């Protein structure tokens, strides 16, 4: 059977553990040469450790694949550009980027520190930009390439205690769509994946109530290896017409998410005043308001 990523060069950020590790392993198994990026920090981003990335590279080599480790942080522009340079220095080209690196600093909004907000934005949103921006010039010149960015239902739908993470993840959706629009003429694709999987980061979710404990037990059933096949597909040539989309993966389910569009309108020929909006405009729109749902309110059935 032919390998879908034969001889392609793929960067996977945050590839030392969890979802990133599984994506790196699958890409290598499908014939790609992989840059395994991970500074090896804790779930909140603290510290550094070369072992996670090195261990994934060794595992890939043991299975007959090709990979190189990179330990730079995505959260600053120059180190992030060095991740791309690692790919071109070692393998001479670049075909795909998976922006998977992330940290969590969960806290209810009024207690969230400025530092906690900025740190999460830096890794998720700025990190996705920095790596993508460094890769974009290469993709432009060769007129090919694929970006896979990671979003989350925390941003797409909502969650408690994750204003930093939700803002970053919804920002990534806008970033991905803009890349898809700007670079489509150069045969460059950009898509988002929203993963449902038990990982070290999800392990930081509070489990104080019985309902929270039950939810986490369900999530534990969903291995990170279930996310990798869709990412591998989006990096491959058969996905050449798939761009600007938002997908979700939960166990053996793949979802296509909607994107923001107007759902209802009201109009008055004479224009609006604050009073007429209160009397007419808002009551007319209210029936179409979205509830303040959390991800668990929408995905109410067990994963299959």
Image (cartoon, rainbow, N blue to C red):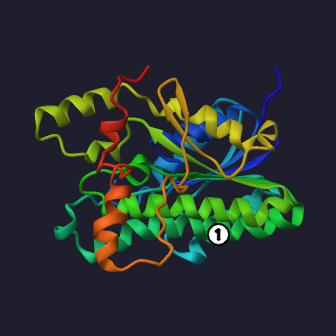
- Point 34% across, 51% down: residue: 158
> Does residue 9 appear to the left or right of 154 in the view shown?
right
Between 206 and 166, the one nearer to me in the picture: 166
Asked which quadrant contains residue 179, the reply is bottom right
Asked which quadrant contains residue 174, the reply is bottom right
Position above or below: 24 against 140:
above
**Residue 99 can be seen in this image:** yes
Which quadrant of the figure contains the C terminus? top left
Q: Considering the numbered disc 1 on the image, is that residue within a helix, a strand or a loop?
A: helix
What residue would you read off at disc 1?
82
Asked which quadrant contains residue 8, the reply is top right
Tell me if mark 1 has few (under 14), some (14-19) or many (20+) residues whose alpha carbon lies within 10 angstroms of its own.
some
Q: Position of residue 231 (x, y in %)?
A: 63, 40
Position above or below: 299 against 182:
above
- Point 52% across, 75% down: residue: 76
Q: Position of residue 177 (x, y in %)?
A: 64, 59
For this orientation, the residue located farthest to the right is: 142
- Point 62% across, 65% down: residue: 131
**Residue 46 can be seen in this image:** no
> Does residue 26 appear to the left or right of 152 in the view shown?
right
> Does residue 284 appear to the left or right of 205 in the view shown?
right
Position above or below: 62 against 41:
above
Q: Position of residue 83 (x, y in %)?
A: 63, 64
> Does residue 59 appear to the left or right of 4 in the view shown?
left
State the count of labels.
1
For this orientation, the residue located farthest to the front is: 270
Which quadrant of the figure contains the N terminus? top right
Between 30 and 234, the one nearer to me in the picture: 234
Between 10 and 221, the one nearer to me in the picture: 221
Q: Position of residue 80 (x, y in %)?
A: 59, 69
């Amino acid at each position: 059977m032919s390998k879908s990523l034969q001889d392609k060069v793929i960067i996977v950020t945050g590839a030392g553990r969890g979802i990133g590790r599984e994506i790196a392993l699958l890409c290598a198994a499908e014939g790609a040469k992989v840059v395994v990026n991970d500074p090896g920090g804790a779930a909140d981003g603290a510290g550094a450790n070369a072992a996670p990335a090195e261990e994934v590279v060794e595992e890939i080599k043991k299975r007959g694949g090709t990979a190189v480790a990179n330990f730079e942080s995505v959260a600053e522009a120059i180190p992030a550009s060095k991740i791309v340079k690692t790919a071109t220095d070692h393998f001479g080209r670049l075909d795909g980027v998976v922006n998977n690196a992330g940290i969590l600093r969960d806290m209810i909004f009024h207690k969230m520190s400025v530092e906690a907000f900025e740190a999460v934005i830096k890794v998720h949103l700025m990190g996705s930009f920095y790596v993508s921006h460094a890769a974009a010039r290469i993709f432009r010149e060769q007129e090919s390439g694929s970006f896979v960015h990671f979003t989350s239902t925390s941003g797409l739908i909502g969650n408690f205690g994750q204003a930093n993470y939700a803002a970053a993840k919804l920002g990534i959706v806008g970033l991905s769509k803009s890349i898809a629009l700007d670079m489509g003429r150069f045969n460059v694709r950009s898509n988002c994946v929203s993963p449902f999987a038990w990982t070290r980061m999800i392990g930081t979710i509070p489990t104080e109530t019985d309902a929270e404990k039950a939810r986490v037990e369900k999530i534990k059933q969903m291995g990170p290896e279930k996310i990798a096949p869709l990412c591998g597909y989006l990096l491959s040539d058969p996905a050449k017409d798939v761009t600007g989309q938002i997908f979700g993966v939960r166990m053996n389910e793949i979802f296509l998410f909607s994107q923001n569009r107007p759902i209802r309108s009201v109009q008055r020929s004479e224009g609006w005043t604050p009073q007429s909006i209160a009397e007419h405009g808002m009551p007319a729109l209210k029936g179409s308001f979205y509830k303040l749902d959390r991800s668990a309110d929408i995905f109410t059935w067990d994963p299959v």
